[in-house]
Image: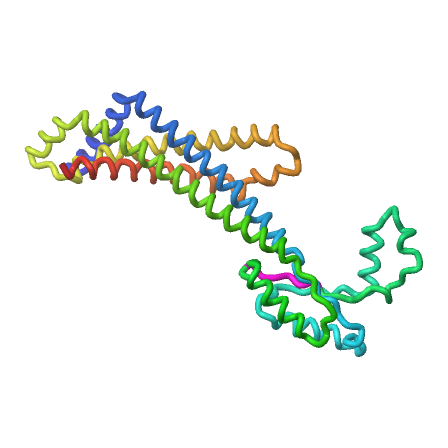
Amino acid sequence: MARRGNSKHMLGDALGSVKENALTTVVTSVTVGFSLAILALFLFVFINLDAAAAAWGDRTHVVVYIKDAALDDAGAVARIKAKTLEVPGVKAVEYISKERALAELKDAMKGHEAVLAGVDAGALPASLEVRLGADYMEGFKAAVVVERFKVMDWAEEVQYSHEWVEKFSAFLRFFEAAALGAGVFLAGATVFIISNTIRLTVYARRDEIEIMRLVGATNGYIRLPFFLEGVLQGLIGGALAVFIIYSGRWLLLTQMPAYLVFVVEVPAAWYAVLGATVAAGVILGAAGSIVSTARFMKR
């Protein structure tokens, strides 16, 4: 019963502090809400762009043209594809026959068919379109794979978009670093604001805390109401963040062109986003409280 009474007292103390410092609580909760909302929207953009980048990266980077003499027997294509898949770094391979190459060329030249008059499938080479794994998107590793193809006896010529792969790899590295930096900054700024807000509350009640120490209250007993206060501020901020995410995404969708809508698509179920956002708010609030009270208790 005593423990239950203590718990009620601590919760009531935390709620009372929140009411007494209503303006501070509102400012802190709004800060948490906007910080989490910005971070969540940033994560949406990052995840969606990363998925799009992965799709772009899955495009063909290496085209290997096959010698006509290497296709003399019926099983040649299967053997060549099997040898290609054995090369480290190769994710997938697709055979493009002479006939298919001509059909694709005609499709690309629609409206200018006269240019291809008299051209038959025999004039074009068969080829393999080789897709590289994500670990081999860097220029040096891709170049090693290309060199492996160049020495194969069935390969006539190898085309490799070296410059495109280099730029793509650099873009991914920059984007990942920027995302990590922004996420750390936003989380750190939120914890800093909450910790300093609660620290002011702790300082304002320093006389009360000293009396509690004199009568034998433990540090844990003293810290718990402030911890609960931080959790409540984080909970309110998390709920506010969900509202901002909903409304902010709706506003963005009304303003951006259709081909960019994928950037702000929600990459998970809404209930998961709701739960994760509120939980993040609670964690940030708790972390801010722990940081602030730890500093004070050391004095």
Which residue is the extreme one toward the left? 214
Q: Measured from the top left, where is residue 63 in percent x and y?
A: 70, 63
Question: In the rendered view of the protein, which quadrant contains the N terminus?
Answer: top left
Residue at 56% across / 28% down in the picture?
Answer: 251
Report the label total.
0
**Foreground: 215 or 139?**
139
Quadrant housing residue 283: top left
Quadrant housing residue 225: top left
Q: Answer whether residue 133 is magenta in the image.
A: yes
Q: Answer whether residue 57 is magenta in the image.
A: no
Question: In the rendered view of the protein, which quadrant contains the C terminus?
Answer: top left
The structure's colour scheme is: rainbow
Which residue is the extreme one toward the bottom? 73
Q: Is residue 243 above or below residue 153?
A: above
- Is residue 123 among what the camera can see? yes
Residue 59 relative to residue 229: left or right: right
Q: Is residue 200 above or below residue 94?
A: above
**Foreground: 81 or 269?**
81
Range of magenta residues: 129-134
Q: Measured from the top left, where is residue 152 in percent x and y?
A: 68, 75
Q: Is residue 20 above or below residue 11?
A: above
Most common SS among magenta residues: strand
**Foreground: 162 or 176?**
162
Q: Measured from the top left, where is residue 20 in percent x and y?
A: 25, 21
Which residue is the extreme one toward the front? 163
Residue at 31% across / 21% down in the picture?
Answer: 23
- Is residue 268 among what the camera can see? no
Residue at 62% across / 69% down in the picture?
Answer: 147
Residue at 83% across / 64% down in the picture?
Answer: 124
